[in-house]
Image (cartoon, rainbow, N blue to C red):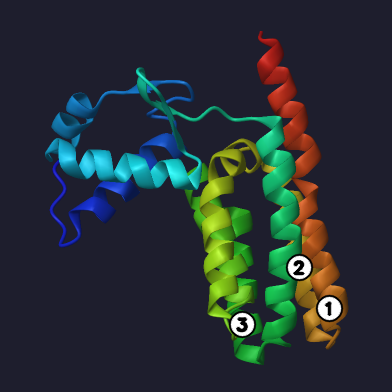
Amino acid sequence: MTLDRPNLSTAVQDRLRELIIEGDLLAGERLNEVGLAARLGVSRTPIREALSQLIAEGFVESIPRRGFFVADLSCDEVRQLYPMRQLLDPEALRLSGIPSTAALDHLASLNEQFGRATRVADVIALDDRWHLALIADCPNRILVDLIRHFMRRTRRYELAYLGKDENVSVATTEHDLIMDRLHHGDLAGACEGLRQNMQTATEPLLAWLAARASGP
């Protein structure tokens, strides 16, 4: 695949992130700069720049004298990441205030699509779109950018959680509850529902990671 976009480093970074999220590059796998450059049709320079950025996002780790590796999934990271979303998202919703009727209709439409989606990539994309639409009116754009950053950091875990139909059903119901509270002007209740929505995935993910670590 050859990338041809104005900002090549960003394009390479986006593509490598996608390959990790989608499982084409596996946790613990060594990332060969020459091989990746050939695969993406670019030189090694944007590959190296992209890998450095992905270290900051938690997708890649650099081991001295050994090279770059796809960062492993861990219980510790789940325990650190998800509580941050429980703080950030409700605060962004509080600052956004009660959405307009049109905005609530848009949220309902996104949630309906989310509940019907069958491809895991579509499920995750629609979940992200719903959460960002929920806080679209937040005046603190730095806070929104932080939430976007944490969305990227949690995406590999969301693949495991939202890859199961029963978890998508739970999330859809929680979204409905948040919207219902907003319809009734209960902003505080909606913020609490959003905090709970962020918390729901933690225990199933920790159980999945524990089972994964113990092997077949």
Label 3 near label 2: C-beta < 8 Å?
Answer: no
Where residue 82 appears, as percent x and y from the top left, is 71, 49
Residue nearest the viewer, comparing 172 with 204:
204
Local crowd at mark 1 within 10 Å, few (<14), some, or many (≥20)?
some
| Mark nearer the viewer, 2 or 3 | 3
- Give the amino acid type for the residue marked by disc 3 in the picture: Cys
* Above or below 22: residue 126: below
| Mark 2 or 3, nearer chain start | 3
The quarter of the displayed image where residue 18 is located: top left
Residue denoted by label 2: 176
Give the quadrant of residue 110. bottom right
* Mark 3 or mark 1: whose residue is earlier in sequence: 3
Q: Secondary structure at mark 1?
A: helix
Q: Amino acid at mark 1?
A: Arg
> Position of 93 compared to 135: left or right?
right
Residue 181: mark: 1
